[in-house]
């Protein structure tokens, strides 16, 4: 009997929230002499692999950076393709997500997405809203600086209206006003394709995350690649400002 790839993972020290910057689709396609859109299309299999690993290891939160606020600057044909691919992928995958008990959430400036895409996303969100097994968060038209500014504006409005006092503002209150208000902060951030940037992604939420960078292009990222990142995470000591000696004695 073949052993599951996750069988050798130390499950006593797993991240509860993994976030992935899915980078390298265009380069993957160009290396094969193909149009960039082929890279985006082949990236769907990598998303499935990531979801499967999280399911096997009972990792409850997975956030995928799918489209940034800056990505609108790309060629219009590519942006149009990405929107259509997003809509068709959600439509084709929703049955499987629902069967697995996965709740779908979208973070970002959703109101600026094409109406047809937004309608498809909302149907999927509504269908899976009561699922408890895990949560898949897709960052769409997302920028962390905008998220932080919007949170500050909401808090300022609450102060202005008298709902809260300035003295009430602390880190917990601020986090509640982020898109991810009811979601734990990120434990492990993965970026593919060999780039060493955060790219305006979950800046607040990754304050104490472990960072993992790999040269693997996203369309080639499969279960073993994900498990390699998980093993690396499990081998690290997270100190949160304390010394290693303190952590060992607690």
Image: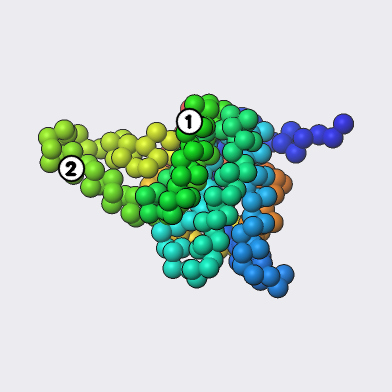
Q: Secondary structure at mark 2?
A: helix
Which mark sits nearer the N-terminus, 2 or 1? 1
Residue, disc 1? 129
Give the x, y percent position of residue 40: 61, 59
Whether pointer 2 and pointer 1 mark residues with C-beta atoms closer than 8 Å, the reply is no
Residue that badge 2 annotates: 157
Residue 126 lies left or right of residue 192; in this view the side is left
Please give the name of the residue rendered at 43% of the width and 54% of the height, measured from the top-left corner: 114
Q: Examine the rendering and report whether any part of residue 58 can be seen.
A: no
Q: Residue at x 24, y 43 (%)?
A: 154
Q: Residue furthest front?
A: 116
Q: Label 2, label 1: how many angstroms apart (C-alpha)?
A: 29 Å
- The percent coordinates of residue 106 (x first, y second) are 45, 43
Q: Quadrant of the N terminus?
A: top right
Eyeballing the image, is 183 above or below 210? above
Could you tell me residue 242's position as x and y percent? 43, 39
Residue 129 vs residue 10: left or right?
left
């Amino acid at each position: 009997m073949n052993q599951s790839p996750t069988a050798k993972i130390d499950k006593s020290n797993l991240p509860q929230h993994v976030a992935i910057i899915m980078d390298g689709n265009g380069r993957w396609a160009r290396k094969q002499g193909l149009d960039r859109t082929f890279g985006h299309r082949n990236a769907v299999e990598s998303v499935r692999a990531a979801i499967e690993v999280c399911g096997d290891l009972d990792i409850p939160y997975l956030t995928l950076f799918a489209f940034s606020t800056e990505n609108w600057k790309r060629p219009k044909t590519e942006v149009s393709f990405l929107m259509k691919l997003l809509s068709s992928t959600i439509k084709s995958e929703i049955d499987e997500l629902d069967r697995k008990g996965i709740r779908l959430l979208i973070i970002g400036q959703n109101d600026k997405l094409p109406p047809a895409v937004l309608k498809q996303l909302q149907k999927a969100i509504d269908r899976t809203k009561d699922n408890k097994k895990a949560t898949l968060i897709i960052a769409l038209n997302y920028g962390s600086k905008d998220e932080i500014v919007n949170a500050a504006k909401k808090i300022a409005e609450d102060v202005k209206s008298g709902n809260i006092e300035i003295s009430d503002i602390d880190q917990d209150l601020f986090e509640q006003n982020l898109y991810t208000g009811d979601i734990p902060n990120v434990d492990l951030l993965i970026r593919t394709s060999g780039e060493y940037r955060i790219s305006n992604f979950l800046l607040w939420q990754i304050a104490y995350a472990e960072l993992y960078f790999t040269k693997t292009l996203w369309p080639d990222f499969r279960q073993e690649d994900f498990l390699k990142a998980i093993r690396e995470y499990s081998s690290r000591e997270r100190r949160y400002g304390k010394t290693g000696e303190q952590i060992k004695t607690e």
